[in-house]
Image (cartoon, rainbow, N blue to C red):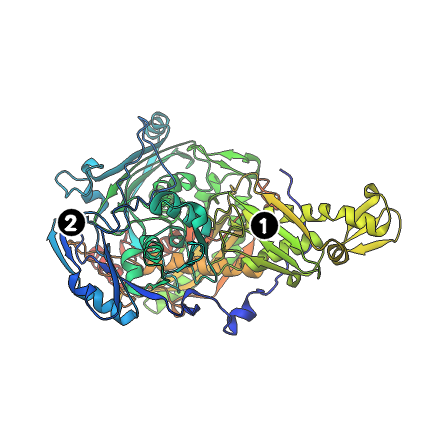
Amino acid sequence: MAFDVLPGLGAPLRRLEDPRLLTGGGRYAADLATPGALHAVFLRSPHAHARVLGVDAAAARALPGVVAVFTAEDTAALGHNPAVTELRDAEGRRHAEPPRLPIPQGRVRHVGEIVAMVVAETLHAARDGAEAVEVDYDPLPAVVEGDAALAPGAPALHAEAPGNLVLDYRRGDAAATEAAFARAAHVARVALRSPRILAGYIEPRAAIAAFDATTGQVTLTTPSQGVHLIQRILCDHVLHWPRQKLRVVTQDVGGGFGPKLNPYPEQALACFAADRLRRDIRWEQDRTEHHLADAHARDLVAEAELALDAEGRFLAVRVEAVANFGAYVSTVNPTIPTAGMAKVLSGLYAIPAAFIRMRGAFSNTAPVDAIRGAGKPETLVLLERLVDIAARETGRDPVALRRLNLLRPADFPHTTPLGYRYDCGDYAKLLDAALELAGWEGFAARRAAAAARGMRRGIGIACHLHATGGWGDETSVVEVLPDGRIAARTGTQSQGQGHATAYAQVIAAVFGVTPDMVQVTQGDSTALARGGGTGGSSSTIISGGTLARAAREAIENGRDAAAELLEAARADIEWRAGGYEVAGTDRRIGLAAVAAHRGGIEGRAEFEGTVESWPAGVAVAEVEVDPETGQVALDRFCSAVDAGTVVNPMLLAGQLHGGWAAGIGNALGEAARYDADGQLLSATLMDYAMPRAEELPGFAHVLVPVPTPNNPLGIKGVGELPTNGAPAAVVNAVLDALAADGVRALPLPMTPDAVWKAIRAAR
């Protein structure tokens, strides 16, 4: 596929959304007035695992202001919230997927699971009602770690999953991999327990379900990453409603990062209650509910090996791992630890053979799903640690070892040993650019200066990439209005990325107008028949390309009117620089005039092609470690990035900065920890270490773009790429700093306590 070169792309345009958002014009869920709405509060299990012997709501229903209490008995007709991806084992068996109901029948399987819904005239009355509900629990033994859940005799969660096994996933050529290891001159090994993390978005979730007494339709307003998936799952599987009965609307969204893609029990129950009571229902999540009940991520325990020949060339890589799925199979999680790992396991390197064995486990914890990176950050920590370990153990320079094994431009398109087809790139140029930006040659002097102050200084490198993906399920509409303004509708959903600006730039480039003439609308299931939502760093690939085609169709649809107004044959009408011209003359009419004559011009396009592209980067982190306290200070962080065609470098920089911060937080502080009984010890921000601006350096990056042939604009999605690379770079830097102390491994996150203990243990 040849990619289009659109004039106007690449301009550093400030976000068109910002004047509205910065002057109080945001329309987040908490901003929406809902006069007369009932308030919902959810009673959640305090136990990680228990039989529910009875729920007595009589006292709650008798309280002033309480309108209804719904329990599992009342919602028994509601259905399973299914996964939308699937995997099968070598024998063709689909992953185990026990029922996940809005309110579980007879047993709870993680702290925070819903036991009852209280609906009242005020929020205070609903809270009082929830406190008055009496639940008779019979506590059961719990298990919280994936590998422990698969051990013989572990507490069993689901009859449908013997031994708590979700799936036994295997990918790659086991025989070729074994043969490569058998002839290897050296084998590097690493073990990793990647901690569970939280999304930590600024705006927690909400559900406002409005009932229309005239039509019987329910309108669900909810912050999401795409309204169509939520509508489809709730109607087709959970509520059992025809889709026209439920309209789903998303306005402004304060962060998503993955978990707001998923349909949740609270959304289904709000719609159910609105329909049952014929009243509007309002629910807003608090921060602890977000920590307890929204999808978590990562939670992987793995052992990996890298085989090298005598010259240092990589022969094979293999991984044995267990992924903790939590209590249920969440929306896209079957493919997160599995295919997510497989897509990037060979990294930027020419590795002939690879094999993964990944077992998924049910445990008494919140369900796990995609959060920024979706299986790749923990994989790249494994791979890049293996490269550093191999360099140290064989006496090689870690940069030289990487350079020796990088894929070359002539190798593309490259099919990895696990079956993925990388599109294009110049990885050696990325490496050179990152090293220059980081001042690699001057590191020895900086290390010596740090040592003179009693500090340990280290530098780490991470070659990394991402597989853009998600659903290419999209209808885009572009309409030139009679007054010349341009209205666009699309099915992806911004959660702060600046879609309205990026899409306006693409559409403006096609029409030859300024971006401020374009108004982009997202987030209404009635406005478009199809839409895949936002996930997998694919929004600009999907909507950018489809909106560009819709704009071109609008131009074509205006050609007849232009011919009529110019009194010329249609065949003589040409489009150039924002208007229609009669070929070979100076007779011309602008787009706005044609739209005014026609009463508007519309173009529609369906997504076609592939969402697949492979953005890549090389990140370099430099740290100082205080050996007396274990405190890690990140002093420098630089990266070279291949994002293909860049629509807006300011938006790109924002995505990179946020992604690096997320990955650095994963490496140095973030961990959602449970105790042995399944109680979440990280239920508030007092107990969960989100990264802070004061802990981060000024980020620097350089672009080394190679546009992809896989979509019309040459775009490689960038939202998750920096999160994939940052943890590995930071881990390698810290361990480089502590190498002289004899520290060879550290648990994640690398907190001061963990670092201090590792130094003392090595001594």
Counting other residues with Cα less than 10 Å from the Cα at mark 1, is it few (<14), some (14-19), or many (20 or more)? many
Residue at 72% from the left image edge and 48% from the top image edge: 555
Q: Do labels 1 and 2 touch, CB within 8 Å?
A: no
Residue 22: in sight, yes or no?
Answer: yes
Q: CA distance from mark 1 to mark 2?
A: 47 Å
Dot 2 lies on which element?
Answer: loop
Q: Amino acid at mark 1?
A: Gly
Q: Relative to the observer, which residue lies in front, 386 or 123?
A: 123
Q: Secondary structure at mark 1?
A: helix
Residue 451, image quadrant: bottom left
For the C terminus, the image quarter is bottom left
Instruction: Return the mark for residue 748.
Output: none
The numbered mark, 1 or 2, whose residue comes first in the sequence reads 2
- Mark 2 neighbour class, 10 Å CA radius: few under 14, some 14 to 19, many 20 or more: many
Q: Amino acid at mark 2?
A: Ala
Q: Quadrant of residue 627?
A: bottom left
| Residue under numbered circle 1 | 544
Q: Which residue is mark 2?
A: 142
501 and 705: which is toward the camera: 501
Specify whether 739 is left or right of 245: left
Residue found farthest to the right: 585
Rendered location of residue 224, percent (x, y): 43, 56
Relative to 474, 667 lies left or right: left
In the foreground, 666 or 545:
545
Vertical side of 72 occupied by 454: above or below: below
Residue 548 in percent (x, y) is at 64, 48
Position in image of residue 101 (x %, y %): 27, 47
Q: Give residue 564's position: percent from left, percent from top.
A: 82, 49
Quarter of image, res 402 = top left
Give left or right: position of 154 versus 104.
left
Whether residue 705 is visible here, answered yes or no, is: no
Q: How many marks?
A: 2
